[in-house]
Amino acid sequence: MFMLSNFLMAVAKLVSFVLSAYIWVVIGRAVISWVNADPYNPIVRFLIQVTEPLLERIRRVLPPMGGLDLSPMILIMGIIFLQSFLVPTLQQIAMALQ
């Protein structure tokens, strides 16, 4: 049981790190949308490829806002919710297994 507890604690930390890193990727994507970034730049292409699947799903649900794209903010709020719910839940399960 102790190994499972340590494994779940490590998974919780990894999930927290990945979600935090993805928030920064979404912020980077939002920033490049404000400037006229080169679409052939590898960094720009990476940011678009990594974020567009989720942002496009959010855009389909959001009503049109007259050119204002709130999908990155909605995505970041969703990630923060996951961090606030999923990571502590995994940590509590790990602590209960000790």
Image: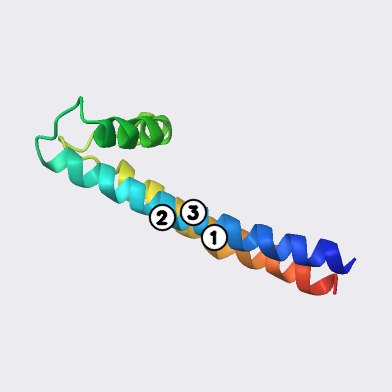
Task: Using residue 40 as the reference point, say whether residue 27 is left or right of it.
Answer: right
- Is disc 3 surrounded by few (<14), some (14 to 19) or many (20+) residues within 10 Å? some
Q: Residue 16: percent from the left, percent from the top?
A: 54, 60
Tag in front: 1 or 2: 1
Disc 1 marks a residue whose amino acid type is: Ser
| Marks 3 and 1 in Cβ contact (< 8 Å) | yes
Would you name the residue on which mark 2 appears? Answer: 77
Along the line of sight, the residue nearer the viewer: 41 or 36: 41
Vertical order, 19 against 56 (above or below): below
Would you name the residue on which mark 1 appears? Answer: 16
Q: Secondary structure at mark 3?
A: helix
Residue visible at 15% across and 35% down?
A: 67
Mark earlier in primary sequence (1, 2): 1
- Is disc 1 surrounded by few (<14), some (14 to 19) or many (20+) residues within 10 Å? many
What distance separates the C-alpha of mark 3 from that of mark 1? 5 Å
Q: Secondary structure at mark 1?
A: helix
Q: Residue 85: percent from the left, percent from the top?
A: 59, 62
Can you say which quadrant of the picture contains the C terminus?
A: bottom right
Residue visible at 27% across and 47% down?
A: 28
Residue visible at 86% across and 69% down?
A: 2
Answer yes or no: is residue 14 visible.
yes
Disc 2 marks a residue whose amino acid type is: Met
Q: Which mark is residue 19?
A: 3
Q: Residue 36: percent from the left, percent from the top?
A: 9, 35
Disc 3 marks a residue whose amino acid type is: Leu
